[in-house]
Image (tube, rainbow, N blue to C red):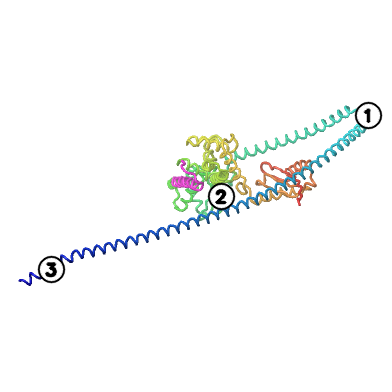
Amino acid sequence: MENILIIVVTFLISAAILIPVGMMIRKKIAESKIQGAEIEANRLLENAKIEAENKKKEEIFKVKEEMLKARNELDQEIRERRGEVQLQEKRIIQKEEMLEKRSSMLDRHEKDLEQKILANEEQKAKLQELINEQTVELQRISGLTAEQAKKQLLEELEKNLTDEKAAIIREVEAKTKEDANKLARELVGYAIQKCAADHTSETTVSVVSLPNDDMKGRIIGREGRNIKALETLTGIDLIIDDTPEAVILSGFDPLRREVAKIALEKLIDDGRIHPAKIEEMVEKAKEEVEASIKAEGERAMLETGVNGLPVDLVKLIGKLKYRTSYGQNVLNHSIEVSNLARIMADEIGADSKLARRAGLLHDIGKALDHDMEGTHVEIGVDVLRRFKENEKLINAVEAHHGDVEPQSIEAILVQAADAISASRPGARRETLETYIKRLEKLEEIADSFEGVEKSFAIQAGREVRIIVKPDKISDNEMIIMAREVAKKVEEGMEYPGQIKVNVIRETRAIEYAK
């Protein structure tokens, strides 16, 4: 027990002694750490100051370098500007020297001109004096005063002018008669085309092929009842003659002729030919033609890009397939006019939609001119007003033959397109060979004149352009040549309308500046 007590007391005493000592040791260690931290902080602060000072010096050095570089660049730019200014000063000085030289040259030229003017004035005075002397001498020789000579000259000139006026009057009268005859021929031709008689077989007959000649008797029928039924139902004459294996259908209305042709072909294919069957086939042929008319109208709209036309108007367009004008198919002509008008409108920035629509409808009256009174232009205008078409379009249709004044550029384009389509080679009843021969003949006549360098037949043979040699043909001779060429063309050629003779004389002066 005592040992335990001793151990406890010893422990307590040791603890009493060791605790203060430990605390002192910890205090010393803490103070030592604090002192080390202060030393480290002072060291870091010193390093930071040194680094900041170094960076400051570096930045100051960089700024000085940039300033030095900027100063060098500025000095370089100033030197360049000074060089440019000096160069401009040199140029200005050179220009001033040139202007001074020119000024002195102009002064010399002015003095020379003044001297020449004075010399000319003196020469003019001498010439006037000489003219006066010659006038007096002429008066003495002729025995006439100046007034009397002037009066005599005017009388002679008036006589010559009277003769020339008489020649011009005769020429105008002859031309008027020629134009009147031409207009009369056109009117007669139009009337024949519109109300074609049976003798114009090229545009009024169709031929139907037969499998054999025995079929002719079956078409005629007992006592001619089959042929009478077919003629009565279609309004077409059937010509059955000695032509082998063929029947000719004759009639002025191409639609009726087409119905009769289709009906007869169907009867021949069927083989049963009697009045009841003929009536049935004629009705079927009419339906087929109606469908064909609508299909042709839709085809024309598709080819021209025209949309939104009423169905009845489309059918009228399709009917143009069975109408010709001077041998030209009117539907094909209308499609061509529409496309030409559209192309020209696109080229000049006009309304191509209006131009193509007016071009397609410009001859729409020809679909009805066999059934109604009036020209095809009047009928077409009435039809288009009935379908409430645009007034600009109606004016283009009404003006395409010059009946009224065109009120828009599109109307003028339709006029031009109609003329182009009608006058191009092969469009109307004139073979390409004849057309080419006429052009060659026209150029041959022009080339036959002396002094002609070259000639060109243009505008589908409606104009010949002649280039003359200026050293051989004068301006006055050029006028006489134009008249003589026109006269020779009139005597040596046959042509529709009129031909413009255009003589061109051009003089060129060429020099080279060295």
Report the front residue among 489 and 281: 489
Q: In the rendered image, which quarter is residue 500 located in?
A: top right
Amino acid type of the residue that numbered disc 3 sits on in the rendered structure: Phe
Q: Do labels 3 and 2 touch, CB within 8 Å?
A: no
Report the front residue among 149 and 70: 70
Mark 1 vs mark 2, foreground winner is: 1
The residue carrying pointer 2 sits among few (fewer than 14), some (14 to 19) or many (20 or more) residues within 10 Å by Cα, namely: few
- Residue range (magenta): 282-309
**Residue furthest out toward the left:** 1
Amino acid type of the residue that numbered disc 1 sits on in the rendered structure: Gly
Q: Which mark is residue 241?
A: 2
User: Magenta includes 303?
Assistant: yes
Residue on which the image places disc 3: 11
Characterize the magenta stretch by its predominant secondary structure.
helix
Residue on which the image places disc 1: 143
Q: Do labels 3 and 1 touch, CB within 8 Å?
A: no
Q: Earlier in the sequence, mark 3 or mark 1?
A: 3
x then y, percent, for residue 238? 53, 46
